[in-house]
Image: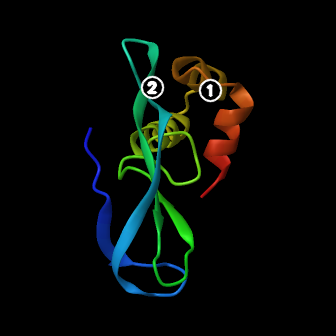
Amino acid sequence: MRHRTASSGVCPSCQHQGLLQRHAIRPCWWRDVPQDGRPQVRRGHIVRWRCPACQQTHSCVPEWALPGKRLTRALDSWVREALRTGQSARAVARGCGVDEKTVRTWGNTS
């Protein structure tokens, strides 16, 4: 996978508009929707950008990942729908490969 060394954008800290310098790339994984009854993992990269004006760094995750969590947007929707249709948290957790308490936490957040 190729990543640019600079990207035009807006710094979330100082609102500087222009090129942001790539600071680091870190491989990461996120839980995804189970397939054939088996938990799935999706791999990607977290890219850190540095603003040349204020020197702050900011992370960007892939569009399909939920920021600040280790799950995809698709899995979040799948878990909420499964809980809404009456599946138990235990069954959903077993399908995702996570603890039952984790699924309950995901289901309780808005």
Q: Which residue is mark 1?
A: 88
Q: Is residue 105 left or right of residue 80?
A: right
Mark 2 element type: strand
Q: Is residue 6 left or right of residue 68?
A: left
Tell me which numbered mark, 1 or 2, is placed earlier along the sequence. Answer: 2
Disc tally is 2
Q: Residue at x 64, y 34 (%)?
A: 103
Q: Which residue is mark 2?
A: 41
Q: Residue at x 41, y 31 (%)?
A: 43
What is the x, y in percent for residue 54? 55, 82
Residue 87 versus residue 12 in the image, above or below: above
Using the image as rendered, state which of residue 60 and residue 98 is in the foreground. Answer: 60
Label 1 crowding class (10 Å Cα cut-off): few <14, some 14-19, many 20+? Answer: some
Q: Which mark is residue 55?
A: none
Residue 11 versus residue 33 in the image, above or below: below
Which of the two discs, 1 and 2, sits closer to the camera?
Answer: 2
The extreme right residue here reads 101
Q: Residue at x 27, y 55 (%)?
A: 4
Label 2 crowding class (10 Å Cα cut-off): few <14, some 14-19, many 20+? Answer: some
Q: Residue at x 42, y 42 (%)?
A: 45
Amino acid carrying mark 2 in the image:
Val
Amino acid carrying mark 1 in the image:
Ser
Residue contact between numbered discs 1 and 2, judged by CB atoms under 8 Å:
no
Query: What is the distance, in whole Å, between disc 1 and disc 2 at their CAs?
Result: 22 Å
What is the x, y in percent for residue 40? 44, 22
Picture quadrant of residue 8: bottom left
